[in-house]
Image (spheres, rainbow, N blue to C red):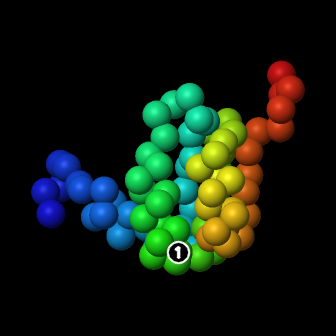
Amino acid sequence: MDPQRLEVGELAALIPDGSQIVIPPDYSGCAMEVVRRLIARGVRDLHLVGAPTGGFQADMLIGAGCVVTDTSAPFGLR
């Protein structure tokens, strides 16, 4: 594993159960392949932090039963 560059599978493997991960909004170039790998692996108890919201990546992880908490900025926050 090159510390300068990780393959998608290597990156997903570094995220253990119970991790806190930041999910960007949909328009920010989502890393959907990492999300698919996490779901396929059956990762559990993730703590998501939306920056500022999680979008469809969060939806997929929540729907797959991978998430225990989800913290995002409320819509309309000023």
At 54% from the left edge and 56% from the top edge, which residue is drawn? 21
Residue 69 can be seen in this image? yes
For disc 1, the marked residue is 43
Horizontal arrangement in the rendering, residue 32 relative to residue 72 (left or right): left
The C terminus lies in which quarter of the figure?
top right
Q: What is the quadrant of residue 44 in the picture?
A: bottom right
Q: Nearer the viewer, residue 10 or 47?
A: 10
Q: What is the quadrant of residue 41 in the picture?
A: bottom left
Residue type marked 1: Val
Q: Position of residue 73 (x, y in %)?
A: 76, 39
Q: Nearer the viewer, residue 24 or 77?
A: 24
Q: Position of residue 4 (x, y in %)?
A: 17, 48
Depicted 16 relative to depicted 37: above or below: below
Crowding near the residue tagged with mark 1, few <14, some 14–19, many ≥20 C-alpha atoms within 10 Å: many
Of all residues shown, which one is farthest toward the left?
Answer: 2
Horizontal arrangement in the rendering, residue 44 relative to residue 74 (left or right): left
At 46% from the left edge and 34% from the top edge, which residue is drawn? 29
Horizontal arrangement in the rendering, residue 40 relative to residue 20 (left or right): left
Of all residues shown, which one is farthest toward the top?
Answer: 78
Count of labels in the image: 1
Residue 47 can be seen in this image? no
User: At numbered mark 1, what does the secondary structure look like: helix, strand or loop?
Assistant: loop
At 47% from the left edge and 60% from the top edge, which residue is drawn? 36
Q: What is the quadrant of residue 24 in the picture?
A: top right
Depicted 22 relative to depicted 16: above or below: above
The N terminus lies in which quarter of the figure?
bottom left
At 64% from the left edge and 46% from the top edge, which residue is drawn? 56
Q: Position of residue 72 (x, y in %)?
A: 74, 45
Q: Position of residue 77 (x, y in %)?
A: 84, 28
Q: Nearer the viewer, residue 10 or 4?
A: 10
